[in-house]
């Protein structure tokens, strides 16, 4: 009789343990689903906030285009009247509240950056040499980036393709296509977080790869074909006075009749090449929204390429591309 009671008690204990384990499992599943539901809810709210902030920013951009010249005095006012999107980094960036939700907005003139998907090997080399002060390192990075981006599997002398990445036990392999996001540069052989921090402010993966002479920093200007120290100094002098370059030809060196025919042709070709790569208006923007549904939630990022167009005869800010993260 005693043995039967012991067996029954043991069975009851195991039953209680089993029920407890099942209950805990259901509790964990329920908790995970609740957390997933809250995360999905936060993302939906943040997505709505990002869209709302972008709609308001886009309206401000279009209003600036349609306002036309103002009576603002001074050189800066005249420059902004001629180019309403001039200085977007300060005029259209900041923090916006969308129904009490915080959204951080950052607008960048793409003419102040170089498109990493359009630069040649020599242009990368020029940019990195000026920024890093190390020609050998600049050459290695330029070749590695072109190997990452080009469609073939033939490695350059100082670059690297799939086999080189495998031998080096690197985490990512070359995609052999254009960069989807600038942060992908961190996966390129030889690129480090410290180097990326130095070069990334001058690069983008969006836009038509035209450099805005009125906003581009010196390292970006120096990459333009035919750019010289004299032309850079001329551009800086105009901008330091609060002036605006109204035409690319305004800063290009004149073709003198006293030089030989070959020299004239060389200057002319350089001028045409620079004109094809340079502009004097802010025509394309990269607008990034970071929306925070709550202090603990991960922000939602919306990145949009906005460009100036004309819709039904009126200037407009059109969306050319967008990316969510």
Image (cartoon, rainbow, N blue to C red):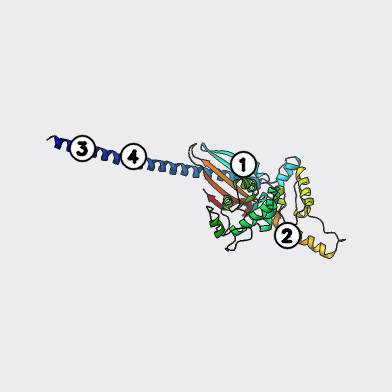
Mark 4 surroundings: few (<14), some (14-19) or many (≥20) residues within 10 A:
few
Discs 2/1, front? 2
Residue 322 image point, x, y percent: 55, 51
- Identity of the residue furthest to the right in this view: 258
Q: Which residue is mark 4?
A: 27
Nearer-N-terminus badge (3/2): 3
Residue 165 image point, x, y percent: 55, 56
Residue 280, visible in the rendered structure? no
Nearer-N-terminus badge (4/1): 4
Q: Which numbered tag is attached to residue 93? A: 1
Left or right: residue 145 versus residue 18 is right
Q: Nearer the viewer, residue 92 or 155?
A: 155
Q: Is residue 122 above or below residue 92?
A: below
- Identity of the residue furthest to the top in this view: 2
Q: Which residue is mark 3?
A: 10
Q: Is residue 29 above or below residue 247?
A: above
Q: Which residue is mark 2?
A: 273
What secondary structure is marked by label 1? loop
As measured in the structure, the alpha-carbon distance from the residue carrying label 4 to the one carrying label 1 is 45 Å
Q: Which picture quadrant has residue 275?
A: bottom right
Q: Nearer the viewer, residue 30 or 21?
A: 21
As measured in the structure, the alpha-carbon distance from the residue carrying label 3 to the one carrying label 2 is 89 Å
Discs 3/2, front? 3
What secondary structure is marked by label 4? helix
């Amino acid at each position: 009789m005693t043995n039967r009671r012991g067996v029954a008690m043991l069975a009851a204990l195991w039953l209680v343990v089993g029920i407890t384990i099942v209950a805990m499992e259901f509790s964990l599943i329920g908790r995970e689903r609740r957390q997933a539901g809250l995360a999905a809810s936060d993302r939906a709210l943040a997505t709505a906030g990002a869209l709302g902030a972008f709609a308001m920013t886009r309206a401000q951009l279009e209003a600036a285009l349609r306002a036309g010249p103002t009576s603002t005095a001074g050189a800066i006012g005249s420059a902004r009247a001629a180019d309403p999107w001039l200085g977007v980094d300060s005029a259209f960036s900041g923090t916006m509240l969308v129904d009490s939700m915080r959204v951080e907005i950052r607008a960048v003139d793409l003419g102040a950056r170089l498109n990493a998907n359009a630069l040649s090997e020599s242009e990368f080399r020029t940019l990195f040499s000026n920024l890093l002060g190390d020609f050998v390192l600049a050459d290695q990075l330029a070749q590695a980036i072109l190997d990452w981006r080009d469609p073939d599997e033939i490695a350059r002398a100082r670059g690297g393709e799939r086999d080189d990445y495998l031998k080096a036990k690197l985490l990512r392999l070359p995609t052999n296509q254009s960069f989807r996001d600038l942060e992908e540069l961190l996966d390129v052989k030889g690129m480090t977080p410290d180097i990326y921090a130095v070069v990334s402010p001058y690069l983008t993966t969006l836009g038509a790869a035209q450099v805005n002479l009125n906003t581009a920093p010196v390292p970006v200007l120096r990459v333009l074909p035919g750019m010289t120290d004299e032309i850079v100094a001329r551009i800086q002098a105009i901008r330091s006075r609060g002036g605006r370059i109204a035409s690319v030809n305004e800063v290009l060196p004149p073709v003198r009749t006293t030089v030989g025919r070959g020299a004239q042709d060389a200057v002319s070709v350089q001028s045409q090449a620079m004109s094809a790569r340079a502009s004097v208006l802010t025509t394309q923007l990269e607008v990034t929204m970071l929306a925070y549904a709550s202090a603990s939630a991960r922000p939602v990022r919306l990145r949009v390429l906005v460009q100036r167009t004309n819709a039904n005869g009126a200037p407009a800010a059109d969306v050319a591309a967008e990316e969510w993260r």
